[in-house]
Image (cartoon, rainbow, N blue to C red):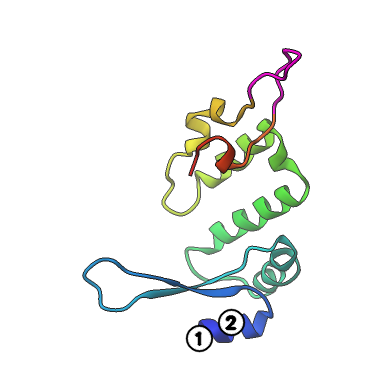
Amino acid sequence: MLHELKEFFGCGNVYVNRRHDNHREHLYRYDVRSPRDLLGRIIPFFEANPLRTAKADDFRKFAAIVRMKEGGLHKTVEGMIQIAKIVETMNHRKPSRFLESSEAIRQPPLPDGRAEDMVLASWRHGGP
């Protein structure tokens, strides 16, 4: 079924989530990460064919975040805070690690002593 979804949307990939517990079979997932595919195919499809489950509200929030990122909002501390606050209300409503430690996203001072507010890639500041 996941491969049929990939064929239907014409984008994304199917991955194996290998299980290392007492289950006998691995899990599979369909994953679309390209902003162009999300904005051009996936989001419009689900806006035209809304979910009728508890996930409908999470989808609306997800679509809003993808659009916020497309507008570059995620490149500022204020934008990341706004996005993190939305994310905290999604799925299992876990507290945002970003909001708990906003200093983790600030770069060290520039050589001339100025501070630069910029969100770093997680691999640059040791995050997950």
User: In the rendered view, would you say 98 is above or below 13?
Assistant: above
50 vs 1, left or right, is right
Element assignment for label 2: helix
Q: On the image, which quarter does residue 27 sit in?
A: bottom left
**Could you tell me residue 93's position as x and y percent?**
44, 47
User: In the rendered view, would you say 118 is above or below 60?
Assistant: above
* Amino acid type at image mark 2: Leu
Element assignment for label 1: loop
Disc 2 to disc 1, how far (Cα)?
Answer: 6 Å
Residue at 68% across, 66% down: 43
Q: On the image, which quarter does residue 16 sit in?
A: bottom left
**Could you tell me residue 52's position as x and y percent?**
53, 71
Which residue does the numbered mark 1 point to in the structure image?
A: 1
Residue at 37% across, 70% down: 18
Q: Magenta part mainly helix, strand or loop?
A: loop
**Could you tell me residue 13's position as x and y percent?**
58, 74
Q: On the image, which quarter does residue 22 sit in?
A: bottom left
Are the residues tagged 2 and 1 within 8 Å (C-beta)?
yes
Front position in the image: 42 or 119 = 119
107 vs 30, left or right, is right
Which range is magenta? 108-117
User: In the rendered view, would you say 27 is above or below 33?
Assistant: below
